[in-house]
Amino acid sequence: MQVYADNAATTQMSAVALEAMLPYFNKIYGNPSSLHSVGQEAKEALEDARARVAKCLGCEPREIIFTSGGSEADNQAIRSAAYYGARKNKKHIISTAFEHHAVLHTLEKLEKEGFEVTLLDVSQGHNITAQQVKDAIRADTCLVTTMYANNEIGSVLPIGEIGAVCKEAGVPFHTDAVQAAGHLQIDVKAQNIDMLSLSGHKFHGPKGVGALYVRRGIPLVNVIEGGAQERGKRAGTENIPAIMGMAAALEDACGHLQENMAKVTAMRERLIEGLSQIPHCALNGDRENRLPNNVSFCFEGIEGESLLLLLDMKGVCASSGSACTSGSLDPSHVLLAIGRVHDVAHGSLRLSLSEYNTPEEVEHILTVVPEVVAYLRSISPVWRDLQTGKRQYIL
Ligand SMILES: *Cc1c(COP(=O)(O)O)cnc(C)c1O
């Protein structure tokens, strides 16, 4: 049995998305900027996709800009707010310690350009509160950017409350909703969100395409200069097949949101309950406000990398943190930010499900993970020291 449980890294593209893309490679192949009929046919498809994406978020079509993915949308949103803030001498940005690197690395660059960044502590309940945001806002704050839901540990942030705080303070609010779009109900107007990033490949759409919602009146700067595509805010001929695939996937996901959520949540709960039986482990992330598909644990006395390799041999594809950190030996910044010490953070496992998974696959995971953890502990010098009392258990 081969179980794919790494849907936070990427998802399998749906048949719906693939079907929606195919005509746009060689039948409706025009450039939407061309004035002739072949181009205008592509333009119509593009605007239709924009309207459908907008509908899923509760905004107007002209508030959607298509990008090359979640990372680009994050970069553009953050740089836009920062540079417009700087014009008014506002150079303070608020974010959280467990953001995706697309956000954190952009903020690090801005710090080098003279911006000041406050990263909110996420160790209490593995989440933040709107009160923390409120307390951090200053007269010179030009942006609050917090993720909607964390990609490693699944915590879902109080986005509506943060939006209300930002609105009251008159500070623009951006959210990286890459893990939330297509998985949770989003209403950018009701939640007072000014900018929102999403990515096609996290909800069974294609890779290399995303969208940025920008509320009317919020200024944008370009990160890619060139032609006047996307109302002059994002140059480059639009990737029409990918945009059509993403729109179809998002529409499909939003149309089946409740049933997918119920199905995936049930599997998540079974996994959390089953894996909690393993001695000396801890669940990562907010237990209550949690992505329906996220299961994240730390197991004391083992190496996450070895765990992943052995799980893969037994047919389970999982992750130890974000796909971007694997390959490096540093423990995940997210696990450190929630207060896991290095040794514990190294023994992490993330299982991220989708509605394509089945209860039988969940049972397979529940058979395999305890076996592999027990085996790795049996050959671990750290585990021996814990058992003989030479080292103290942390979990
Ligand atoms: C995957 C992911 C991104 C990056 O999206 P890409 O489309 O792969 O660039 C950004 N933020 C979060 C939270 C993600 O999970």
Image (cartoon, rainbow, N blue to C red):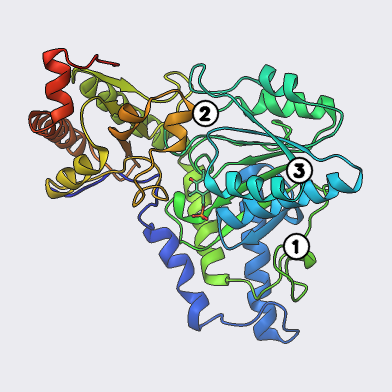
Q: Is residue 230 above or below residue 178?
A: below
Q: Neighbour class for label 2 at 10 Å: few (<14), some, many (≥20)?
A: many
Q: Quadrant of residue 141?
A: top right
Foreground residue among 382 and 213? 382
Which residue is situated farthest in the right direction here?
A: 88
SS label for mark 1? loop
- Whether pointer 1 and pointer 3 mark residues with C-beta atoms closer than 8 Å, the reply is no
Q: Position of residue 251 (x, y in %)?
A: 53, 50
Specify which label sits upstream in the sequence, 3 or 2: 3
Q: Which mark is residue 115?
A: 3
Q: Which residue is mark 1?
A: 222
Is disc 3's CB within 8 Å of ligand 1?
A: no
Ligand 1 within 8 angstroms of badge 1 C-beta: no
- SS at badge 3: loop
Which amino acid type is marked by label 1?
A: Asn
Front-lying residue, 127 or 251: 127
- With 248 as the anchor, is 368 left or right in this view? left
Which of the two residues, 108 or 132, is positioned nearer the viewer here? Answer: 108
- Looking at marks 1 and 3 on the same chain, the residue that comes earlier in the sequence is marked by 3
* Dot 3 amino acid type: Phe
Q: Residue at x 35, y 55 (%)?
A: 12
Measured as percent of width and height from the top left, residue 5 is found at 29, 43
Q: Is residue 100 above or below residue 370?
A: below
Q: Is residue 291 visible?
A: no
Q: Position of residue 309 (x, y in %)?
A: 19, 47
The dot on residue 156 is 2
